[in-house]
Amino acid sequence: MKFEVTILGSSSATPIFNRNPTAQILNINEKLYLVDCAEGTQQQMLKFDVKGSRIDYIFISHLHGDHYLGLVGLMSSMHLNGRTKELKLFCPAPLKEIIDLQLKYSETKLHYPVEFVFTRTDSPDVILDNQDITVETIPLDHRIPCTGFLFRQKKRLRKLIKDRIEELQIPVQYYTALKKGKDYEANDGTIYKNEVLTTDSAEPKSYAYCSDTLYNPKYFEQITGATLLYHEATFLNDMVDRANQTHHTTALQAAQVAITTGAEKLIIGHFSARYKTLNELLDEAQTVFPNTELAVEGKTFVISE
Amino acid sequence: MKFEVTILGSSSATPIFNRNPTAQILNINEKLYLVDCAEGTQQQMLKFDVKGSRIDYIFISHLHGDHYLGLVGLMSSMHLNGRTKELKLFCPAPLKEIIDLQLKYSETKLHYPVEFVFTRTDSPDVILDNQDITVETIPLDHRIPCTGFLFRQKKRLRKLIKDRIEELQIPVQYYTALKKGKDYEANDGTIYKNEVLTTDSAEPKSYAYCSDTLYNPKYFEQITGATLLYHEATFLNDMVDRANQTHHTTALQAAQVAITTGAEKLIIGHFSARYKTLNELLDEAQTVFPNTELAVEGKTFVISE
């Protein structure tokens, strides 16, 4: 099952050096999930050929402008482009008030329904559970209420061993039971154990999105073993005092999160405008966690094929 | 005195085909005035090297998102970039409520003061009068309250005829009076008429910004004789019914406004997403008003040198 993330924005606070503030698009089994939506996300979507009509879920981590100021524009464009299907919006509760006020004064009545699911920061919540994934909030430690999001692929059914199934001439109506792990009893009474008829499906993959946050072990357990961890890395570690003060993380700390929680791979992003080039941030993270890459606009990271 | 306008966005409603929604930057005597501020205006400013720190005045025509959704992001960036000097914001009153709500939930207290001047649509108002210009609102006819803005250069003082002044050895302390039109009495009692000592300064130039509006003669008198007229031209004239219905103007109608009001030059903009290329819009306007140009991102139009 396709499970990948494309970076639409990697900058913190302001657009600069051709970097846009935070937005990411997940393609999970050909459905699109937008994670944060900074100003200019629409323009980035045009640039990287992401169709708004394919997005059914939007997740907003918190109400700093560099994570949501593109949302009302995107929602308006969906409206103008004739959208009628529901949009699900996972966000801090006050965002509804902000959206409603803007729609009120522009005298816009959206042609499609929006279902709001409000995030909380007191404990992790499963906020979405569909046929492909579950999504949990990750309560983070920022200056204002902020959650990350943990996307977990669902365990797929077992796979039939075709040759064996054909050889035994097992009727089609037994396939689903076999995929679910049942044994098979042939007409002659012979019992075939499930493990000789099927193989296990791949282990479910996961994507943990952590932005913005102070380095704080409180969320480590929840994200343990992520296939791919995105973690903000606003500063180099020589600015750790500034990171602490502003409730952000350094590249070194992001790498420490990755190694501590046993992530397979780390992407760092949310880079401060003070860094024109990003090599030093990457180098610093890789000293601790070699399998680190930079969030770069337009780059796609595959979580599972 | 420098008086020029640079187009930052020419699209209506949504960003498309590398066109951004509406924003323009005026340079008047090396002060910058931002007119409308769609989503992505910050990014356009970076692209065309416009410094936010040089903007002291922002004018918002109305509260459709394609004219103001970039404002809170720009204001936040000004804050993050250390601005302390006042920003004057001319806009419909509810914009203050929208901005205040967003600053509240991001827990942002701007480091610089913002002076709001609320626009009205019942009659034209002079909303700014400084040493270089006056600015009047132009009440337009749109679906929601909307004003254009008329920027009028102030009449400059008369210019001294240097050769004549030196020949007569007129002392420096008389210069200001001469520039203001006074005659000069020499020590021997001879009266020199002002017109032999000075020449008139150039006629003041003006820029009329009209977006968004139904074609409606009610604002024609006010903008008569504009040096440069920007007028929205959302559609071709074969869509005039749609233009009427949505309170927009066609390219042909924009040209009719220009010819009726005696503009020297016309820029058309605010192009619908249905037009991938703009030649037809330009051709249509030029059949009526040949001195028409297209609003194109990054293009600067000189109103006076």
Image: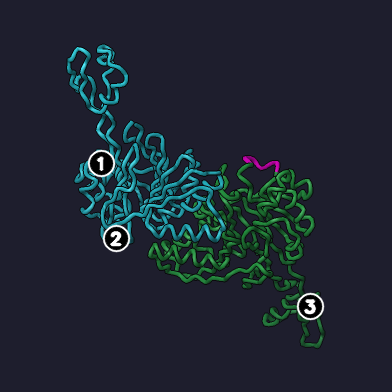
Chain colours: A green, B cyan
Say above or below: B134 vs B98: above
| Residue A165 image offset from top left, x and y in percent | 74, 76
Q: Position of residue B244 (x, y in %)?
A: 26, 60
Judge if badges 3 and 1 mark residues of a common chain.
no
Foreground mark, 3 or 1, reads: 1
Tell me where the magenta segment starts and ends, as one range. A275-280
Q: Nearer the viewer, residue B274 or B130?
A: B130
Between A165 and A268, the one nearer to me in the picture: A268
Residue B83 image offset from top left, x and y in percent: 52, 44
Q: Which residue is mark 3?
A: A194
Amino acid type at image mark 1: Ala
C-alpha distance separating marks 3 and 2: 65 Å
Q: Is residue A129 left or right of residue A178?
A: left
Q: Amino acid at mark 3?
A: Asn
Q: Tag 2, which chain?
A: B
Q: Amino acid at mark 2?
A: Arg
Q: Are marks 3 and 2 on the same chain?
A: no
Side (left or right) of B146 relative to B110: left
Q: Quadrant of the C terminus of chain B?
A: top left
Q: Quadrant of residue A205?
A: bottom right
The chain identifier of the residue carrying mark 3 reads A
Mark 3 touching mark 1, by CB under 8 A? no
Task: Locate the N terminus of chain B by quadrant.
Answer: top left
Q: CA distance from mark 2 to mark 1?
A: 28 Å
Residue located at (29% from left, 36% from top): B154
Disc assigned to residue B242? 2
- Which numbered dot is residue B226? 1
Q: Residues within 10 Å of mark 3 (few under 14, many from 20)?
A: some
Disc 1 element:
loop
Question: Can residue A305 be spotted in the picture?
Answer: no
